[in-house]
Amino acid sequence: MTTATVTPTAPEATPAPAPMSAGGVIRIAAGATTNVTDSEGNVWLPDQGFDGGDTIQRPDVQVTNTPDPMIYQAEHYGMDSFSWKLPNGKYQVKLHFAETYEGIQGPGERVFSFDVQGQKFENFDVWQRAGGPLKAYVVTVSVDVANGQLLINFTENVQSPQINGIEIIPMT
């Protein structure tokens, strides 16, 4: 007679949400290859969470309209989406933009759309919104995460979408 031993296996664990900084805030410096520390001592993680696209660093550009020009000296461009695992809840998402590509010479030369957790921003033109090149512009969106993940989709209209930074701030 043959006997078999069955070893029970634990159910697959759900991946834990990504680690957060103090206060639960996540900051991503799009395009950066190392951590970036802003003027308030906050650490921004290097580029991650993007699907598609490419990155570039422009360490010599001087971006105005911000106390933290170093956030805008790198970018992720041509991406399809950004996603980040999060505990369900309400968040404030800040998207940081500046037109730093010298090939863009005026409004209408880079126009794209994006969708932050279902909230659509159509025909977004960084140059127009910021009032010219090399000027920081921040879009703030309040979102409700109900499926354990923040999702931002990008769509090219004219020239590739681009972004310099993303902040994800839990709302209390």
Image (cartoon, rainbow, N blue to C red):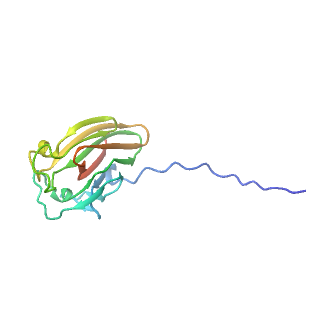
Quadrant, the N terminus = bottom right
Residue 107 picture quarter: top left
- Residue placed most toward the observer, 57 or 145: 57
Residue 59 appears at what percent x and percent y? 17, 64
Q: Residue 116: percent from the left, percent from the top?
A: 31, 39
Residue 75 coordinates in the image, percent (x, y): 24, 56
Total labels: the figure holds 0
Q: Nearer the viewer, residue 112 or 87?
A: 112
Q: Is residue 172 above or below residue 69?
A: above
Relative depth, front residue between 64 and 79: 79
Spot occupied by residue 108 in the image (x, y as percentages of width and height): 14, 43
Foreground of the two, 97 or 90: 97
The residue lying at 31 percent from left, 58 percent from top is 47
Above or below for 42 versus 122:
below
Q: Residue at x 61, y 48 (%)?
A: 11
Q: Is residue 68 left or right of residue 152?
A: left
Task: Please identify the quarter of the rendering in which residue 111 is found.
Answer: top left
Which quadrant is the C terminus positioned in? top left
